[in-house]
Image (spheres, helix red, strand yellow):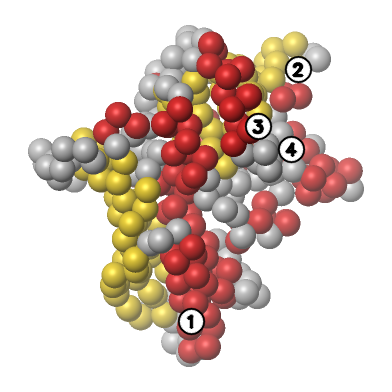
Amino acid sequence: MNEFELIERLCRHLPLNASTVVGPGDDCAVLDLGVADRRFLFKTDAVVEGVHFTAETDPRLAGVKALARCLSDIAAMGGTPTHALVTLGLPDGYDLGRVESLYIGLGECARHHEVAVVGGETTSSPGSLWLSTALFGWVTPGRCVLRSGARPGDALFVTGELGGSLASGRHLSFEPRLEEARWLAATFAVHAMIDLSDGLAGDLPHLLKASGVGAELHSQAVPVSRTARDRARKGGRSAFEAALTDGEDYELLFAVSASDAVPLMDGWKTRFPGTKLSCIGRVTSETTVTIRDARGRRNLALHGYVHLQEP
């Protein structure tokens, strides 16, 4: 079974308690710890050598990524990160200088986002080097955005550009959209949001499934990165396919009422002039994802990255 089938099966055995507002299935867990004006967010993620970075990767950038991946999930909930714990898995014969550089990068990222790294764990690893980060944060109750609120007729937006993240190295140097997400949640009624780590074709269905809806994407509106376009011109997959399936973009995908689309675009251009925002389609009452282009309308036949998926 693949990653998501395994998660669904394993979660059947796990208990929740009265403080759990949202458990497994969203970008973060949401907890009510008795503070009236706050809900708390909890997230964990890992970077593994050979999967998320290579032996040739600048270890400082791998350390940045170890925290930034979790920061992107906090952003997808409209939240503010505060504290982190880091677990380090070390193989035999590890390079101390390389490991220290990992932590230098992680520390730089934490300071930039005012996150305190308050502890963790170190263990031996029979395989590769890895870092697992648990991140804690908070959100105002009325501004916590889940995956499950998209409605038929909503406009679908995505920040930035998609595709080519691994080839360009952007997967190691992206800026989590924390400020943008908080502005969105404070200014508009964002019905649903998710961060794009496994590609648009992989993460959009998670949002739609949680909301019980479908979507129609306009192929010409999907923002494709220059790297994806350049690679497409040299042969191989199309730029559009790369934008849907490459993954590791760490952009925000969200749904708002169609009536908010124009005010949102106008406000965004003023507030974040250096970051692209694109309306890429709409939410439908069908439970499928379709693509509309010059050839007409067809079902999406692509999927994003899935751990444990057989080739």
Look at the picture and state if 168 lies above or below 294: below
Q: Provide residue 125's location: percent of width, then percent of height.
A: 39, 77
Residue ID at (29%, 70%)? 118
Inspect the image, locate mark 1, and give the three-letter code of the amino acid beneath it.
Val
Which label sits on residue 269?
3
Check disc 4 and report its element: helix, strand or loop: loop
Kindly report which numbered mark, 2 or 4, lies closer to the viewer in this rendering.
4
User: Disc 2 and disc 4: Cα gap in Å?
Assistant: 15 Å
Assess whether mark 3 and mark 4 are in contact (beta carbons under 8 angstroms). no
Q: Is residue 3 visible?
A: no
User: Disc 4 and disc 3: Cα gap in Å?
Assistant: 19 Å
Mark found first going from the N terminus, 1 or 3: 1
Q: Provide residue 106's location: percent of width, then percent of height.
A: 47, 69
Which label sits on residue 293?
2
Mark found first going from the N terminus, 1 or 2: 1
Inspect the image, locate mark 4, and give the three-letter code of the amino acid beneath it.
Val
Look at the picture and state if 175 lies above or below 121: above
Inspect the image, locate mark 3, and give the three-letter code of the amino acid beneath it.
Lys
Kindly report which numbered mark, 1 or 3, lies closer to the viewer in this rendering.
3
Q: Report which residue position mark 1 lands on.
A: 99
Q: Is residue 4 left or right of residue 264?
A: left
Mark found first going from the N terminus, 3 or 2: 3
